[in-house]
Image: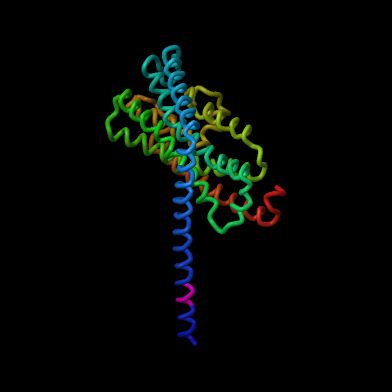
Amino acid sequence: MIHSELFETEDTEIKLGNERQLHRSSFLIVVNETIKKQLTLRFRYKANMVGEAFGVILQVAIFAAMAGAVTLVGVNNLEGNNVFIFFLASLVLIVFSTVALSAPLNAVIQELHNGTLEYLFSTPISRYAYFIGTAIAEAISKSIFFVPMLIVLILFSGVNLYTGLLILIVCITVIIGLIAFGVLVALMGVMWKQVSAIATLLFTFFEFICGAYFPVTSMPIPFQAVAFALPHTWGYDLIRYYSFQGTWTPIMPIHLEWMMLVVYAVLYIVVSSKLLKVVERRAKKFGLHLI
């Protein structure tokens, strides 16, 4: 009797182990297949990419013009070329942060347009893997713009290869946290469908309040409190710290900013995964056509 119970326990553990392995492999399969699908669509419709390229060029031109006309006074007094580095550091992160925030919502809008959203939520695949795959595919396509801008920032600021690598790691860490935040925005799209205007307002607000255009420390205290709860803030500040080769005065000690960046990435991943499960249960109970 004891031996049979031991064998049953071992069999149960083996089954659980196999299920976990299958779940991990299926998660990666969904991510991989979603990346392939999204990249196929992205490169099939080239007019969209041309428009995005002109948009990025226009942003660089605007920031370059502002750098020649603006002097930023505060803890870090900036003028001339330093102002351009300040804005270029923002633009490097804006390219990827926009992707991370908007890609999951765009996926939901696309599924709504195609009439396949309910099918997506009725299949046994991981919806989180689907959203992650979509965001990664968008990031890969946007790297066409990101890589040249990162190279320009490295060359213009005169940082070494190691510091350039740290800037890249900052961008990747911010993206991880923002993809999770983007999933939260996508869930708004699942629940309420027409949320593009709200999402655009949120993204613009995030860029402004997190320090893309002005140092966070120059803003009113209530704005700073909101900014400190968002990962972009620490991303912008770290990139500028490394771009100015340590002459930039950070909001907090650098090791604490890295800690904030990682903590927020983990926090948003946990929160978004929990809320996704709530939406999935609601979808199974009521149907997405009733939401």
Asked whether the viewer can see residue 246, the reply is no
Q: Is residue 177 above or below residue 51?
A: below
Main SS of residues in magenta: helix
Q: Residue 46: give x, y in percent of width and height.
A: 47, 33
Please say whether residue 171 is one of the residues in the magenta stretch: no
Labels in figure, total: 0
Residue with the most extreme top position: 69
291 and 177: which one is in front? 291
Please say whether residue 10 is one of the residues in the magenta stretch: yes
201 and 57: which one is in front? 57
Question: Is residue 260 left or right of 81 when viewed as pictured?
Answer: right
Q: Residue 71: give x, y in percent of width and height.
A: 44, 14
Give the quadrant of residue 10. Answer: bottom left
Asked whether the viewer can see residue 280, the reply is yes
The residue positioned 42% from the left and 13% from the top of the image is 68
Residue with the most extreme bottom position: 1
Give the quadrant of residue 79. Answer: top left
Q: Is residue 137 above or below residue 32?
A: above
Q: Is residue 108 above or below residue 148?
A: below
Q: Residue 144: give x, y in percent of width and height.
A: 39, 33
Residue with the most extreme right position: 290
Question: Is residue 169 left or right of 128 when viewed as pictured?
Answer: left
- Colour basis: rainbow
Q: Residue 268: give x, y in percent of width and height.
A: 52, 44
Q: Which residues are magenta?
A: 9-13
The residue positioned 48% from the left and 68% from the top of the image is 16
The residue positioned 51% from the left and 47% from the top of the image is 269
